Each structure stands twice: as C-alpha cells, then as structure tokens.
Amino acid sequence: MATASNVSPLSNTAQVAAATPSGPTLGKDDFLKLLMAQMANQDPLSPMDDTAFVAQLAQFSNVEQLQTANSTLSSLLTAQAAGNQTAATSMVGKDVQWRSSQVQLGAGPATLHAQLDSSAAAVTATITDSTGRTVRTLQVADAGAGPLNISWDGRDDSGNALPPGTYGFNVTAADMSGNPVNVTQSASGLVTGISFAGGTAQLIVNGQDVNLSDVIEIDQATN
C-alpha cells in the first residue's frame, strides 16, 4: 500500500489537468482550481509552507486585476473606434488633400499637387499610365517653397488626348546647385462618403478609399 510520503503535489498531474479546463489562456478561476488540487494532493506529513500559498494567492490577485484591466481597455478601444467613426462622418462634403502619387483625369484638365520643402530652380513632373509607361513630362522653373500646383491638360507628349482614368505621377525638384529638394506629393477631391468595410473608417474620394492617416488638409467644399 502506498504511503503518504509517496504523494507529491507535482506528481499528480492527472488530477491537476482534470481540474483545469482546456483553453488558450488561464484565468483566475483556473489558477484557483490548480491551488485547490495542489492543496488536496500535498503530503500531509510534510505540508507546503504557508508562505508559498500566500505568494500564490497574491499572484491570483494580480491575474484578476490584469483581467479587469484588459476588459476595461477593450471597452475603451471600442468606444474610441465608435468615436472615430462618428467623427469621420462629419468630413462628408469637405474638400480634402492627402498624400498620394495618383491623379484622376476626367473630362477636363487635372492638377498635380506637391509640397516643396525649399525653393527649386527646376521641377519635373512625370505622368505614367496604368502600365507604368511615361505619357507626359511637365517642367516648372523657379518654384518657391510651399505648395505647388501643376496643371495637366490631359494630353500626352504628342498632344493626343488621353482617356479618363487613374494615372500615376512623380515630382522631382532641384535647387540652383543641382541638389535635390524634398517633395511631398498629394491629391485632392471631395469626400462623398465613408467606408467601414475594412473595420476602420476610410474616406471615399474620387471613387477610391483614402486612409484618414494620409489626409494632410481639410477645407470647406467650393461651389
């Protein structure tokens, strides 16, 4: 017959596992069940030090506090997401400018938007079609620091009218010494709606989704 000295809190893993429900994480109730299983299977002739139980109870208390904190943070994140969605709806009907390397060509001319960090002696705008082929190259001389709007008549370098659609563009600039000038490219348009399809609010501008983090300017819509 087995004696009491043969029983160990660590040897009876079957009972501990039975007391612990399967799941991806352990909660405070799981740790309490583990403690009860440990106490029930300790050696009665050599019980565990009570300080060990006190330390474990302190750990269980910390687990409970962390779970409460996680629940509170989840509620705050949900409320913040709802607030962001509500705030995004107020942008419908506004003109916005956002970081972009694309321009929409409609029935008339289009405008390429750029921001120069410093004055430039020469600015070059290269426009490409959907295949990446260069269709038009525009030159601007003596551009000052700040916003720069480059008008494009919608024609290629041969003077042929291009079909409406989405075109890519790249703006480079250099100062009088030939040193490059930093350029930030952007696009503009009227916000006609908000999309929540991806789980986050995105502006619908010119038929495309625009991330709120890319928006650099918001203006009242012009007639």
Image: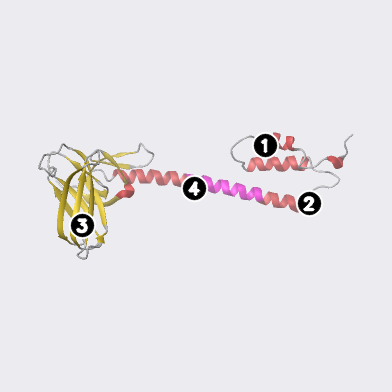
Q: CA distance from mark 1 to mark 4?
A: 27 Å
Q: Main secondary structure of the magenta part?
A: helix
Q: Nearer the viewer, residue 189 or 29?
A: 189
Query: What amino acid type is highlighted by mark number 3?
Result: Pro
Given this view, does label 4 or label 3 mark the residue nearer the observer?
A: 3
Instruction: Residue at 68% x, 42% y: name it.
Output: 32
Mark sitting earlier along the chain (4/3): 4
Left or right: residue 36 compared with residue 169? right
Residue bearing mark 1: 20
Query: What amino acid type is highlighted by mark number 4?
Result: Leu
Relative to residue 178, is residue 164 depicted above or below? above
Picture quadrant of residue 41: top right
Query: What amino acid type is highlighted by mark number 1?
Result: Thr
SS assignment at label 1: loop
Do labels 3 and 2 touch, CB within 8 Å? no
Q: CA distance from mark 3 to mark 2?
A: 74 Å
Residue bearing mark 2: 49
Residue bearing mark 4: 73
Which span of residues is magenta-colored? Answer: 59-74
Image location of residue 133, percent across then percent down:
22, 41
Mark sitting earlier along the chain (2/4): 2
> Which quadrant of the rendered structure holds the C terminus?
top left
Given this view, does label 3 or label 2 mark the residue nearer the observer?
A: 3
The total number of labels drawn is 4
